[in-house]
Image (cartoon, rainbow, N blue to C red):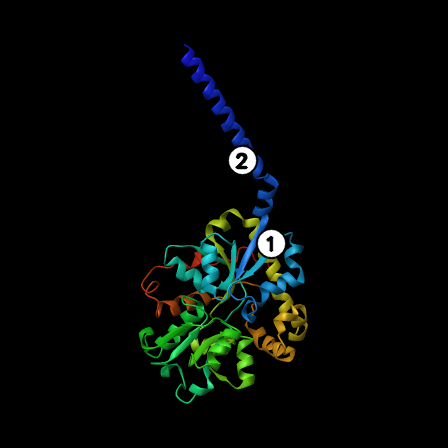
Amino acid sequence: MRKFVSGARKLTKISTVVLAMSACATLAVPTEVSAADASKIIIMVGGITKMIYLPAKLTEQLGYFKDEGLDVELQSQPAGVDAENELLAGAVQAVVGFYDHSIDLQSKGKEVTAIVVFGQVPGEAEMVATKSAGTIKSMADVKGKTLGVTGLGSSTNFLTQYLAAKHGISSTQYSVLPVGADNTFIAAIKQGRIDAGMTTEPTISQLLKTGEASVLVDMRTVEGTVKALGGLYPASSLYVQRSWLNTHKAEAIKLARAFNKTLKYIKTHDATDIASKMPKDYQGKDKVLYVQAMQNSLPMFSADGRMPVGGPETVLQVLAGFNPNVKGKHIDLSKTYTNEFIPQNK
């Protein structure tokens, strides 16, 4: 009997300790903090200073996120594929990157959806180093050359492969080197580490000004993109995981509304006005060059954020032209984007 009472007392003490520990654990994570964390939306941008992703920072600068009652934090990765990985890992809620990732990921069994389309065209150009311009007159001449991309698996990598494949050159017949963007891309050209490479503004204008590279394929305009890719190629966009979208439609509506306002602002203001809204460190040492690069970029942007008609089909056709993950697979394009959250035009 004594042994039974003694054991019961020990169990009572243990239970008391466990309950106390549980209480401490509950107190250690205040509900207010959890709620605050849950309300923040972290958007990863695949290179925040790139002109193709201008709407991300501009929306913040104009105060449109706050106007919608959103707590948004913008972060940056040098390449779109890195931003994509952060999204899939659950570290961020949204990505500002290229729409083509949504098709590529669906072929791998992962679902992401673009809810706002910023760019009707890639806004990129294949630049050939002046030292190599004599031997590279078109993408038909890249056999045996080293081509720069922002990152392996990035949209610049996708487009490079397609443009070469159009001329019958497979990815095994040239080398691809991930060199990032901005200064690291320029350094790769200067140092002769790449013969040509795909990049965006303001890097394109900087290389043209110094004479260190020239444009081989220009996809900054509708005309140039249709010539290179056969149609409109919706590119820079805001995309999220489908699972997040299904449970955060209110936030999706606010994000789409904020970006819709920004795209309308871009269409109703000139490059100088828009540049003045951006952080001074984005402009670098040459403000005139920055404004010129801005001017070169403005035609690429959508007026409202809607997916352009025929755009998804062009992107699918491009990816299927070289990507074994996509070629021959059924892709449900209706799941890769939605116009549901874009405000109706007034």
The amino acid type found where label 1 is placed reads Lys
Q: In this view, does 254 lie above or below 82?
A: above
* Mark 2 and mark 1 residues within 8 Å of each other at the beta carbon: no
Q: Nearer the viewer, residue 99 or 87?
A: 87
Camera-near label (2 vs 1) is: 2
**In this picture, residue 318 sits left or right of residue 118:** left
Position of residue 195 measured from the top left corner of the image (x, y, whole percent): 42, 81
What residue is pinned by disc 1?
A: 254
The amino acid type found where label 2 is placed reads Ala
Which residue occupies 46% across, 62% down? 82
Position of residue 16 measured from the top left corner of the image (x, y, whole percent): 51, 24
Q: Nearer the viewer, residue 231 or 244?
A: 244
What residue is pinned by disc 2?
A: 25
**In this picture, residue 183 sits left or right of residue 278:** left
Neighbour tally class for label 1: few under 14, some 14-19, many 20 plus, Cα within 10 Å: many
Position of residue 96 measured from the top left corner of the image (x, y, whole percent): 52, 62
**Kind of element beneath mark 2:** helix
Q: In this view, does 42 lie above or below 268?
A: above
Neighbour tally class for label 2: few under 14, some 14-19, many 20 plus, Cα within 10 Å: few
Residue 303 visible in image: no
Would you identify the image quadrant in which residue 30 lies?
top right
Q: In this view, does 100 lie above or below 163?
A: above
Number of on-image labels: 2
**Kind of element beneath mark 1:** helix
* Residue closest to the far top: 1
Q: Quadrant of the N terminus?
A: top left
Sequence-wise, the earlier of marks 2 and 1 is: 2
**In this picture, residue 199 sits left or right of residue 175:** right
